[in-house]
Each structure stands twice: as structure tokens, then as C-alpha cells.
Image: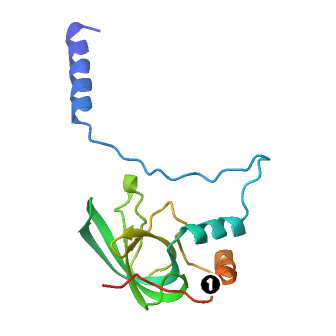
Amino acid sequence: MGRKNIFVIVLLAFIIIISARDVFACPCTPIKSDANGNFPTQAQEVKKAFDESNAIFSGVVTKIVNARHGNYTNRFVITFRIDKSWKGITKRKIKIFTGLGGGDCGYPFKIGKRYLVYAYDEGDNELGTNICAKTTRLTKTTEDLKILDKLKTSKVESNYLPN
């Protein structure tokens, strides 16, 4: 390989390195086994998500808006028509936030689709969710719904308003 080829390769490598942007990875915590190598049951996973979530509901996405939110440059504001609430929601309509996807862990919601949403408090009377939460699309009756029905508290109060 001649000197000219080496120079071109080094120059290209330098250009690639200096033009690289910050890369963000979604920091989801993997499900871990206990000391005996046993993984949690579905009921245990749902119970943990129930305890860690500020709100849990099923609903249909009616609107998606890309908007600036807090310290984030852009986030999606997702409006839901609530079918059922297991925790934290007493309204029939709610707005939650999620990232745009990719490295910011945003959940890929679609208008007109029904979801089971596990949401967390983002502060300022707002809820959010992401791909690390147990949020999932409801395409059929799932075991999670039966487990949630057993976990649901008798009286659920909500501070989360639809704005």
C-alpha cells in the first residue's frame, strides 16, 4: 500500500471520528434471576410493575403530537381514551409523554391502537412511559389483565389531569 493510500485511509478515519454525534442507548434493566437461577413468574413481574408504576390503564391512542417537554428537546405527547384503569387514573382521557424512539427509549405508539400502559410520574402532574416499562399493545386478552384485576386497589385517586 502506498503512502497516498495510507494518507487517504487516515484522513477518512479522522473525518468519521470528528463527525460522529453523541450516541444514546436505552438503559433498560434486564430481568434477573434469583440466587437459584430462577426467573420471576409473570405474576411477580406484573406485581413489581404495579408497585413501581404511578398509573396503569388500558386505552386507545387518539392523538400523537411531537412537542418540547421539560429538559428534553422533543417528546411525543400521546392522548389516550381510557378503557379501564387499574391504578392512578380516574379520568376518561389522559395525556402521557414518551421519547421519540431509538436511544431515548420512547415507546412506538400508533393512533387507533389499544395499549396496556404502565406509566410513571414525570413531575409537574405529568405521566410518561417507555419501552423499559411493561407497556404493551393489547391485541388479545393477556394474562397481565387477569393479574392486574387481582391487584387493583379498591379506591384509586388520580392527580393526573388530561390538560
Instruction: Name the residue located 21 percent from the left edge and 14 percent from the top edge.
Output: 7
Where residue 100 appears, x then y in whole percent?
Answer: 34, 62
Instruction: Name the residue located 50 percent from the left edge and 86 percent from the top edge.
Output: 157
Instruction: Name the residue located 46 percent from the left edge and 84 percent from the top edge.
Output: 158
Task: From the viewer's perspective, tell me whether residue 66 is left or right of residue 51.
Answer: left
Task: From the viewer's perspective, tell me whether residue 139 is left or right of residue 158.
Answer: right
SS for callout 1: loop
Q: Amino acid type of disc 1?
A: Thr
Instruction: Name the residue located 29 percent from the left edge and 42 percent from the top edge.
Output: 22
Q: Quadrant of the N terminus?
A: top left
Q: Which residue in the rendered view is the most extreme toward the right?
A: 36
> In the figure, residue 109 lies in which quadrant?
bottom left
Q: Nearer the viewer, residue 68 or 71?
A: 71
Say if 152 sits above or below 6 in the image: below
Q: Nearer the viewer, residue 153 or 2?
A: 153
- Which residue is identified by label 1? 153
Task: From the viewer's perspective, tell me whether residue 85 is left or right of residue 67.
Answer: right
Where residue 147 appears, x then y in whole percent?
Answer: 69, 77
Task: From the viewer's perspective, tell me whether residue 70 is left or right of residue 139.
Answer: left
- The 10 Å Cα crowd at callout 1, few under 14, some 14 to 19, many 20 or more, is few
Q: Quadrant of the C terminus?
A: bottom left
Where residue 60 appears, x then y in whole percent?
Answer: 45, 84
Say if 128 sits above or below 28 in the image: below
> In the figure, residue 108 lies in which quadrant?
bottom left
Say if 75 sits above or below 63 in the image: above
